[in-house]
Amino acid sequence: MSKVHPLARDAVKAIVPYASARSSMSGGAVWLNANENALAPAYQLDGTFNRYPSCQPKAVIDGYAAYAGLAAEQVLVSRGADEGIELLIRSFCEPKQDSITICPPTYGMYAISAESNQTSVNKVLLKNNERLDLPGIFATSPKLVFICSPNNPTGDLIPREDIIAVLEHFKDQALVVVDEAYIEFAPEASVVSLLSRYPHLVILRTLSKAFGLAGLRCGFTLAAPEIINALKKMIAPYPIAEPVAQIAAQALSPTGIAQMQQSVATINALRDDFITLAASLPGINKVWPSNANYVLLQVSDAAACVNALIAEDILIRNQSSQLGLSQVVRVSIGSPAEMQRLAGAMQRYFQPNQ
Ligand code: PMP
């Protein structure tokens, strides 16, 4: 890790930063390690940029509110869903006092953002990597509970009744944050309709995945206005650059949404074909049933598998360091041509004699 100035806060020195797929790049022509969308449309920018942008651009807020079926007051736009996670922790967790509860194996930024705010993390492992351990979660006293559905990296949907049980248990005590970064790949599983029943429910969304705009850095927090107002006090000025706002508004237009839905249909079909292939290969011990644009595989040697694919110019992600998992790799679904290349490389690695 790079050297940190001695005057930095102890909490900063202790942080192991997020290992971004794009900071640890080792070449590779086919990028299947960051759950991006290879089928993204192109967008055009318009105008000059000499003025400060709106802090919460109206076209983007109104566009997302219409897309999600909510009021504008229930929507915050931020620099990716990652900033939503950080704002929630900084706004609701008293440093050195409060905790959050997460359900590993899951997305890494909940713990990293908590640590940077000197907030402790209760880790309650998922049962069989798919169901919440409700008694385990109820034994914690957090300010925020993070539930990721579809879960990264397993691809599982967390059952609605489990989410409702957590919401019922933590009424008036904690916010329940459901991270729906990948929900467009399984839209029927969204809990957005529960916002009207549970004022302590928060939903995280993003344009990085199904909308194919990871490079834009644009995400959304959906919640009761009182929660959104708290986050607005903490957010840095002008989080959404004018070019980002222009492109996000185009993505959220009826044409943009239709394009997104078309690419989701293509990706889901490619994913199901890839699952069929992976399940047929000897040496792949387990294939998780995915509801997102990635598939988790258990292999006998994850590092060797990643390296064999790197040798073929294909990047996938080793997720073996995740709590509750061992020898697993996560493969993001790419374009049809990329998936064909991947299939050939996997067959050569797992079935070398055929
Ligand atoms: N939540 C989950 C589950 C994710 O996988 C990611 C991206 N890797 C994020 C949130 C953050 O998304 P964004 O690009 O909008 O910051």
Image (cartoon, rainbow, N blue to C red):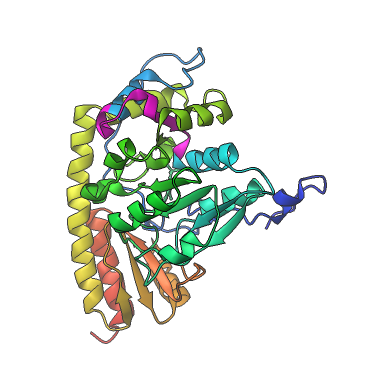
Residue pictured at 47% horizontal, 57% vertical: 27
Q: In which quarter of the image is the N terminus?
A: bottom right
Which region is colored magenta? 66-80
Q: In which quarter of the image is the C terminus?
A: bottom left
Residue pictured at 76% horizontal, 51% vertical: 10
Task: Write down the quadrant of residue 89 in the picture.
Answer: top right
Residue 162, given in percent of the width and then of the height, sits at: 34, 58
Point out the residue furthest to the bottom here.
Answer: 353
Foreground residue among 86 and 24: 86
Task: Write down the quadrant of residue 325 in the picture.
Answer: bottom left
Q: In this view, does 221 lie above or below 109?
A: above
Q: Is residue 197 above or below residue 74?
A: below
Residue 77, given in percent of the width and then of the height, sits at: 43, 30
Determine if residue 105 is in view.
yes
Residue pictured at 47% horizontal, 60% vertical: 138
Residue 117, given in percent of the width and then of the height, sits at: 64, 45
Tally of numbered discs: 0
Q: Is residue 177 above or below residue 79?
A: below
Residue 95, given in percent of the width and then of the height, sits at: 67, 45
Q: Is residue 165 above or below residue 197?
A: below
Q: Magenta segment: does it hold 69? A: yes
Foreground residue among 311 and 196: 196
Foreground residue among 22 and 221: 221
Point out the residue furthest to the right here.
Answer: 6
Task: Write down the quadrant of residue 72 in the picture.
Answer: top left
Determine if residue 318 is in view.
no
Taking the image as shown, residue 3 lies to the left or right of residue 261, namely: right
Residue pictured at 46% horizontal, 67% vertical: 125
Q: Magenta segment: does it hold 167? A: no
